[in-house]
Amino acid sequence: MTQFTDQLTQYGGPDWLTAKRRESLDLFNTLEVPSESVEAWKYTRVDVDFSELRPHPKRERVTDISALPESVQKRLTSTDVGAYLVLDGPDVVYATDLPADLREKGVIFTDLKTAVEQHADKVQQYLYSVVPAEVPDDTTIAAPGTTPSKSPDPSEGKFSALAAALWTNGAFVYVPRGVEVELPLGSFRVMSEAGTYTATRTLVVAEENAQVTFIDEQDSEELPDTYAIGAVELVVKQGARLRYVSIQNWGKGVTHIQRQRGDVARDAVLNSLVVTMGGTLSRTEMQSYLRGQGSDSEMLALYFANEDQHFDHYTLQHHAAPHAHSDLLYKGVNADQSVGVFSGMIKVDLGAQKTDAYQKHRTLMLSSEAQNYSVPQLEINANDVRCSHGSTTGPVNQEALFFLRSRGIHKELAEKMLVTAFLEDVLSRVPLQSVVKYIEGIIAQKVGAA
C-alpha cells in the first residue's frame, strides 16, 4: 500500500514510535481482510478498497464551542465531565484544562500526540501493551494432554495493524497511585468530511488504587464511504477502579471498527459500557483480560439498529487468575431490515479456580425483516468454577403495546417506552445521569418519538 507508506513519512515522533508504525504497516500488508470463513467474522463482511482510502483532512483549533458542530455543542452543554477534548478527524480542535488540583496530584489528561511529546516515558511503557498491532493470542491455558482453544486467525488483526500504524491522535489519561478523579474525563470525536478515514487510539492508565471514569463519544453527520478505525487500551493496576464508556453515534455511511481491551490486575475493577447507535456498519470488540487474582470486570452494552444498519459485537472474558469475577450483559434492539450480531466467549485458564463468570445477551426484535445472530460460548479448563451463559431473542410484547395504545399513547411513543424499559437493566447500572439521558434521547429519535 504505497499511499500508506507515504503517509508514515509525514508522521513525526520518536524513533521507537516510528519503528513500531512501520512494523505494524508491514504486518497489515501481509494480512487478508477477515472473511466469513473466519469464525469471529462469520456474519460480517467489510467491503473496503484500501487503495481508495484517503486520510481525513487536518482541522484548525477553535477558541469557542460555537464553532464546533451543532451536535457536539449540544452534548458539551449537557455533559458533566470535568475536562474534555474535542477531535475533528486527526486534530484537537477544542479542549478544556484539567483542574489544577488534579494536575498537582500528577494526573495527566491530554491528546495522545501531545502525550508522546511531553510524557514519552509513560506512553512508551503502555502504548500497544494491551491492544498490539497483531491480534492477541488468547488461547486458553489447558491441562496437559488436552487440546486448548485455537489461536485467533491472523487476519483478525488486519484493522488493528492499520490502527497501530496510522493513528493520528486520540486521548491519553494517566492517574497516579492512590489518586481518585471524582468527575469523569471525556473525549468527543467527530468527522466532518465524507470519503475519508480516521484512525485513533485511547490509552487510559490507572495506577495502583487509583480511580477514574472516562467517556469516549463519537458523532458525525451523514458521511458516505467513511471509515472510523480505533483501538482502546485500558490498563487497570492492582486495586484500581476504572469506568470506561464508549458511545458510538456516527452518521449514516460510516463504517466503525474498534478493538477495546482491558488488562485487569489483582483486586482491580473495570466497568465498561459500549453503546452502539450510529454508522451503517459497526464492528466492536470488547475484551477483558483478568490477569490478577480477585480482579473484576463488568461488561455492559446496548445497541439499537434500524434501517439497514449492521452491528457486530465480539466479546471475550478471559480468566487467567483464580477468584476473579466477570459479568457481561448485552441488550440490543433490531428494527426495519437491520442486522445484529453477538459472539461472546468466556475462557477459563487452567488454575483459574473459583472463577465466577456470567454472560447474557438479549435482543428485542421490532421487525420481522430484521435479523439477529447470537453465539455465546464457554471454554473452561478449571474444575471449581461457576460459569453461565444465555441468549434470548424475541419480538416486542404485543399485549404491552396494545395496553399502551389503548391508553391513548401513539405507536412511536409506546415503542420508545417499551424499548427503554427493555434496556433499563443496563442503563440502571450506569451512574452517569447525563449519559443515560443522552442515550434515551437517541432511542427516542430511533423510534420517531423525539
Image: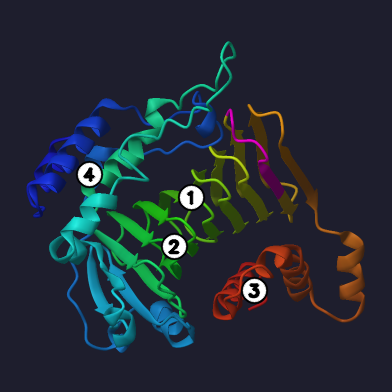
Q: Which mark is residue 165?
A: 4
Q: Residues within 10 Å of mark 2 (few under 14, many from 20)?
A: many
Q: Nearer the viewer, residue 116 or 61?
A: 116
Number of the front mark, 1 or 4: 4
**Residue displayed at 66% across by 39% down:** 373
Residue 254 magenta:
no
Q: Are marks 1 and 2 in contact (CB under 8 Å)?
A: yes
**Camera-side residue: 416 or 143?**
143
Element type at mark 1: strand
Is residue 360 a member of the stretch shown in magenta?
Answer: yes
Q: Residue 396 location, x and y as percent?
A: 81, 58
| Residue where numbered disc 2 is placed | 250
Farthest top residue in view: 145
- Residue 364 lies, in percent from the top left, at 74, 54
Kind of residue at disc 1: Ser
**Horizontal arrangement in the rendering, residue 224 relative to residue 29 (left or right):** right
Q: Which residues are magenta?
A: 350-361
> Which residue is label 3 attached to?
444
Location of residue 427 by image quarter: bottom right
- The amino acid at mark 3 is Ala
Residue 413 placed where, x, y %?
74, 75
